Image: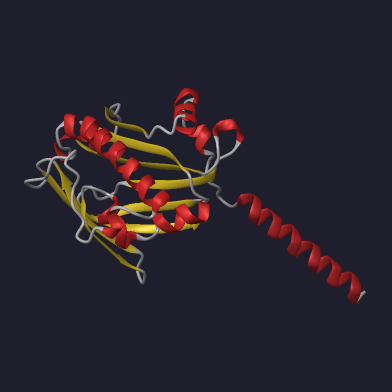
Amino acid sequence: MAFRVRVMIVAVCAFLTGVGLMGAEQPPTIESLLKQSIYKRMAENREVMVYAKLADVPETPDAKQKDFKKYSFYAAMRVQESLPAVRRALLDYAVYPKMIPYVDRAEYSASNRILTVEGGIWKFRLKSQVLMEEKSERWIHFRIIGGHFPGMTGDMFLEPMSGTGGKGTVVYFRGEKLGPESEWPPRLVIERGAEIVFGFTGGRMRSYIETKSGPQNKGTPSHDHEVPQPRSHF
């Protein structure tokens, strides 16, 4: 009798564990998030694919939604390094000012998981506090909780390259935010400007990860001449 009870307990625990694993949220495959032609260009040609859009939001019975805009963006690239190596680099927030041309300062507090970033592009400056959540080895979620663009949420997805596209790791970064039209910078900046910066940044970050030389060995980080310097604030 006691033996049967123990067996039943083990079986129930195994079943509940299986249900828990089945119900655990998993990141989507990066290929499912991109058009096939876009994924192929990124995987086979090693293009840094970027997109940014400030779109109208359909009116709803909720008056707060009136004149709101939805901002969404993504960047995707293939890195010629293993997933663990890419993940370590992306989580090394202290080197962001060296990897990212428009970030001047990045400080991370491990105790509360808040990353403070400051920088700018063209004549616009920003400073935000970002709550980072490592959901899994392949998934890092973020939410801006203070400073500019509060409420913006996003994800970084990583996955090993497979198929005929080549070796390495695919990185996909996305974000979105809903807000009143008055909250956003000019469309040219938030769309085309963002795409230029994301593309340039993706290439620079990839080079940093793959070579581990260049920006991090040059002392004080400097902005590349291809990116105009910021002069004022959002």
Please state if 159 lies on the left or on the right of 118 as rendered: right
Q: Residue 214 placed where, x, y %?
A: 30, 52
Q: Residue 59 placed where, x, y %?
A: 28, 27
Q: Nearer the viewer, residue 209 or 231?
A: 209
Q: Residue at x 65, y 50 (%)?
A: 22
Please state if 206 lies on the left or on the right of 5 as rendered: left
Please state if 200 lies on the left or on the right of 104 as rendered: right
Q: Quadrant of the N terminus?
A: bottom right
Residue at the far bottom: name it: 2
Q: Residue at x 13, y 48 (%)?
A: 125
Q: Quadrant of the C terminus?
A: top left
Q: Quadrant of residue 107?
A: bottom left
Q: Nearer the viewer, residue 207 or 159?
A: 207
Considering only vertical position in the picture, is 188 above or below 128?
above
Q: Residue 197 placed where, x, y %?
A: 25, 39
Q: How is the image coloured?
A: secondary structure
Q: Residue at x 44, y 53 (%)?
A: 140
Q: Nearer the viewer, residue 208 or 8?
A: 208
**Is residue 35 in view?**
yes
Count of number-bearing discs: 0
Q: Residue 57 placed where, x, y %?
A: 29, 29
Residue at the far left: name it: 232
Q: Residue at x 35, y 47 (%)?
A: 205
